Amino acid sequence: MKYVCYYRVSTKSQGKSGLGLGDQKMIVERFLREGDVILEEHTEVESGRKSARPKMLEAIRSCQKFGAKLLIAKLDRLSRNVAFVMTLRDSGVDFVACDLPDANTLTVGIMVTFAQHEAERGSERTKAALAQKKAQGFKLGKPENLTKLAIDKGRTIRIENAKTHKANVQATELAILYRNMGMTFQAIADKLNQSHYLTRRQKLFDGKAVYRLLERKNE
């Protein structure tokens, strides 16, 4: 199989230091089989939310030129921007994500659409809640309204969320997709484990864990 590889790091500092790039290349190397050929490699230094991705467009053009597949180490290397994923779909180029080889432009398109919708809803809910608090006479954004205990607790929660948020959200989106396809909770757990996802407690998924994952989404 002929591949054109696409790597992305999120910041300029990561691009200069190579932080995260080595891991992506290692994942690609483990994925390749005997006879597979990498024709080109393209590395993007961009934010995942930006739709302007010149290196990705170069990689797509290379795939079209050589009749190759686009190879991505991890699914989150694709943009979270819906319009960009649709551009990839319309290009006619096939892609493979090493961590989820069964994914395609249809499933990824559904995932990013869902993620964008949830992000917009979350923003709206936050604004509405703050407006209600303000209407009730609360003074927002004042440090004196928080005790030291509350500040420390908030910091701990933010640190924990920073460690688990991205993978947890992505696993939830995949679980919803698989469930909508009629798969059992255990079958979904097997799929997540095969793609190296872990629960928030860093354990393998089982049927009960998938059930709780979906239940939390509905809360």
Image (cartoon, rainbow, N blue to C red):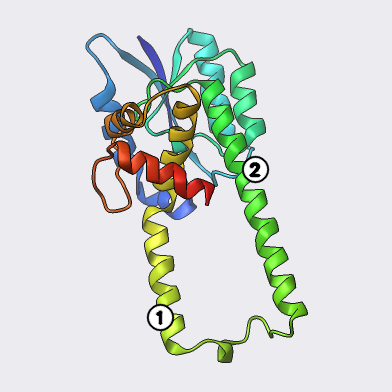
Say above or below: 94 vs 77. above
Q: Which residue is mark 2?
A: 117
Residue 100: x %, y % from top left: 38, 27
Q: CA distance from mark 1 to mark 2?
A: 31 Å
Which residue occupies the foreground of this view, 143 or 21? 143
Say above or below: 135 vs 5. below
Sort mark 2 into few (<14), some (14-19) or many (20+) by Cα contacts within 10 Å.
few
Residue 168: x %, y % from top left: 41, 47
Which residue occupies the foreground of this view, 125 or 53? 125
Q: Which residue is mark 1?
A: 152
At mark 1, the secondary structure is helix
Which residue occupies the foreground of this view, 40 or 77? 77
Residue 63: x %, y % from top left: 50, 15
At mark 2, the secondary structure is helix
Query: Residue at coordinates 27% horizontally, 53% vertically from top-left?
Result: 201
On the image, which quarter does residue 192 sit in? top left
Query: Residue at coordinates 44% horizontally, 55% vertically from top-left?
Result: 13
Which residue occupies the foreground of this view, 172 or 35? 172
From the viewer's perspective, is 2 left or right of 89? left
Residue 170: x %, y % from top left: 45, 40
Q: Amino acid at mark 1?
A: Asp
* Image quarter (top left, top right, bottom left or bottom right) of the N terminus: top left
Query: Residue at coordinates 35% horizontally, 49% vertically from top-left?
Result: 19
Say above or below: 4 vs 16. above
From the viewer's perspective, is 119 left or right of 164? right
* Residue 193: numbered disc: none
Say above or below: 45 vs 86. below
Marks 1 & 2, CB-CB < 8 Å contact: no
Q: Amino acid at mark 2?
A: His
